[in-house]
Image (cartoon, rainbow, N blue to C red):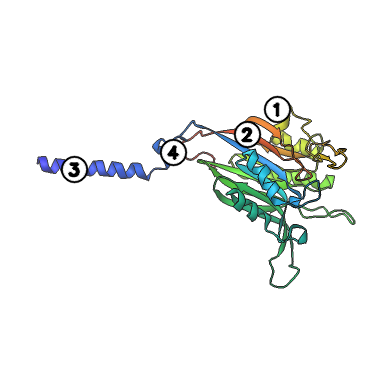
Amino acid sequence: MKRALKYVFQLLLFIGLISSLALPADARGNSHAKGKEIPLKVMSFNIAHGRGQDGVVDLQRTAEVIRTSGADIIGLQEVDKHWSSRSNFVDQAKWLAEDLGMHYVYGANLDLEPTEEGNPRRQYGNAILSKYPILHYENHHLTTVFVPGANNEQRGLLEAVINVKGNHLRFFSTHLGLKDEERLISAEEMIDIVDASQKNSIIVGDMNARANFPEMERLTERFHDVFAEKGMDEAFTFPAPWIDPETGETIKTPSSRIDFILADKNIEIENAEVVTTSVSDHLPIVSTFILKKEKPFYNGQGK
């Protein structure tokens, strides 16, 4: 009888051990369990296909700005993929991701036939780089308002669902159009896309609009404008500064804020900063958020 009880006890211990190992890591009490605060640094950067204010295309300089910033997730705009000789037909998102050791996704808004048969298609659009695994992505094409003789470029909102230490975050990169009426429509479409899920969301991008434009006022009804929340309304991002190296004359000085980081209003903002550089015609912007795990391994999954 004693031997039988011993075997039963050992069996129960074994079942308990197996059950505990089957639980997700956060439920087993690791450092990112319920209530743990997780800092997350994000960047928005219109890289102008790697072309600096000196007219030189050098993607390595772009990579160094990103690396030095310490950003965990980066939304990029004006990214070439086998586009043309201007960027040596490089797949720029892939090149940057490999150089930085990051995951990436790409969303083509322009998609053209190759210049020579057998070559890859020529694409231009947005990209997302991430230190953390990307679980899903989708490129949402936004409505184009066609005006004869105007810039009627297709615009898009690139979405990635990213697993940030157990937090499933929706991160978006966009580059809005040049027409007022089109941006108003885009703003409504962006809100609808974000509101289709309960996951926390952050949108970054070149909005081609100032904070007091109607489309931005609409967006900031729904989201926090990170720089405005930090009292940095004059954190100008365009054009990037440029000093003539031969004469020392200041040729360009930032004079408008058209690049934004927008976030769900329940996400805590720690800080925000404009990065000074001349490797693009736009200045990159960064912000650190504090993500809080409200549940031990379901957080951010819309449950």
Q: What element carries label 1?
A: loop
Q: What element carries label 3?
A: helix
Q: Residues within 10 Å of mark 4 (few under 14, many from 20)?
A: some
Q: Which label number is shown at residue 230?
A: 1
Residue at left 70%, top 65%? Answer: 121
Q: What element carries label 4?
A: helix
Q: Which label number is shown at residue 8?
A: 3
- Judge whether 253 appears above or below 92 on screen: above
Q: Can residue 195 be seen in this view?
A: no
From the viewer's perspective, is 120 left or right of 249? left
Residue 207 coordinates in the image, percent (x, y): 77, 43
Q: Where is mark 4, residue-wise?
A: 26
CA distance for labels 4 and 3:
30 Å
- Quarter-of-image position of residue 244: top right
CA distance for labels 2 and 4:
23 Å
Mark 1 residue type:
Lys
- Judge whether 196 appears above or below 276 on screen: below
Residue at left 70%, top 47%? Answer: 61
From the viewer's perspective, is 244 left or right of 111? right
Q: Which of 262 and 218 is in front in this view?
A: 262
- Judge whether 166 appears above or below 78 on screen: above
Q: How crowded is mark 1: few (under 14 residues within 10 Å), some or many (20 or more)?
A: few
Disc 1 to disc 2: CB gap under 8 Å:
no
CA distance for labels 4 and 1:
32 Å
Farthest front residue in view: 246
